Amino acid sequence: MKDIAYYNGAIGRIDEIKAPITDRGFYFGDGVYDAAMVRNKKIFALDDHLDRFYNSLKLLRIDPPMERGELAAVLNDLVGRLDTDAPHMLYWQSTRAVAHRKHAFPTGCKASLMAFAEPCALDKQNQPYQLITVEDTRFLHCNIKTLNLIPNCMAMQRAVEAGCDEVVFHRGDRVTEGAHSSLAILKDGVFCTPPADELILPSITRKHFLELCDKLGVPTHIAPFTVDELLDGDEIMILSTGSHCLAVSHVDGKPVGGKDAALLGKLQKSYQDWFIQDTDK
């Protein structure tokens, strides 16, 4: 299969698998999700993604649909059914239950599990992004990877309509993250990233880049930074599962970055090498 899906034990093509209308994900967004890149039918950094997934379940008090080892087996079996080794995005989510609509948690119900994999090439590393700044009005639980992404969708649509690729969310002067990615800057040879508090998602790629910088001897600095500090960065970096690491060329139509291409390129290549090595046959 070129794409494949799963819902509570049923497996088929994405357009074939159905979910009950009373799944709480539909009317409350009552669930969490995660996603990982697949290459050669191998899931990149699955353990890291499962750590975040189970932490999100715990924070929302959702009993896991299955034990971690069983879920890993389900996801690996799913991608193993693909008929191509080309890159895919693997997405999975768990909702609290299938139950009639009441705000309080239903009793005696089991969490649902949905997953799918579909073709998804990595973004080209040599095509910088253009961004717009957007006031961050999301709730104060951004560290939980929930299904509640309406503010992200609205902000991303604004970016698209402005001819841009992503947004810079900020709360007042403080930069948080993008609509679907993490933000970092390079300044004077230092990799700078906001703290992983309740205002940002604990990005797996951000975590990996901190590990990569430590391995390469690149200094790191974890602290909040302002929009002005972002704009003054030697390089602005987009970090995400689907793009790994991309440079930023413009913010709100003004040129930015382009001052430390050597270090940026070194980090991009090192992470790409990591990904290729871990997903080779």
Image (cartoon, helix red, strand yellow):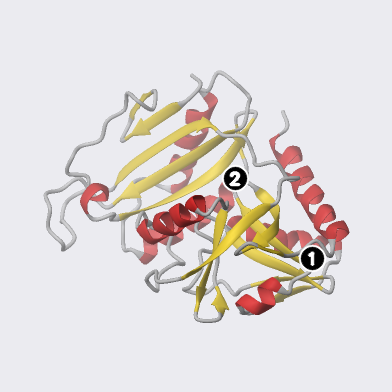
Q: Quarter-wise, where is residue 141 in the image?
A: bottom left
**Mark 1 nearby-residue class (10 Å; few <14, some 14–19, many ≥20):** few
Along the line of sight, the residue nearer the viewer: 30 or 109:
30
Q: Is residue 23 left or right of residue 237?
A: left
Amino acid carrying label 2: it is Gly
Q: Is residue 197 left or right of residue 190?
A: left
User: Residue 214 — which label?
Assistant: 1
At x 50%, y 58%, the residue is 179
Q: Position of residue 170 (x, y in %)?
A: 52, 73
The disc labelled 1 sits on which kind of residue? Asp
Instruction: Say what secondary structure mark 1 lies in.
Output: helix
> In the rendered image of this protein, does residue 172 appear above or below residue 263?
below
Q: Taking 257 as reference, is 152 left or right? A: left
Q: Residue at x 20, y 45 (%)?
A: 98
Secondary element at tag 2: loop
Quadrant of the frame with the C terminus:
top right
Q: Residue at x 52, y 33 (%)?
A: 76
Q: Residue at x 12, y 58 (%)?
A: 102
Distance between the alpha carbons at the discs numbered 2 and 1: 23 Å
Measured from the top left, where is residue 123 in percent x and y?
65, 42
Q: In the rendered image, is residue 4 in sight?
A: yes
Picture coordinates of residue 248, whole percent (x, y): 69, 58
Foreground pick, 132 / 275? 132
Q: How many marks?
A: 2
**In-front residue for pair 200/58:** 200
Q: Nearer the N terminus, badge 2 or badge 1?
A: 1
Checking the image for residue 243, the label placed there is none
Residue 118: x %, y % from top left: 50, 31
State the residue position of label 2: 242
- Viewer-nearest residue: 278 or 230: 230
**Numbered disc in front, either 2 or 1:** 2
**Residue 110 in sight:** no
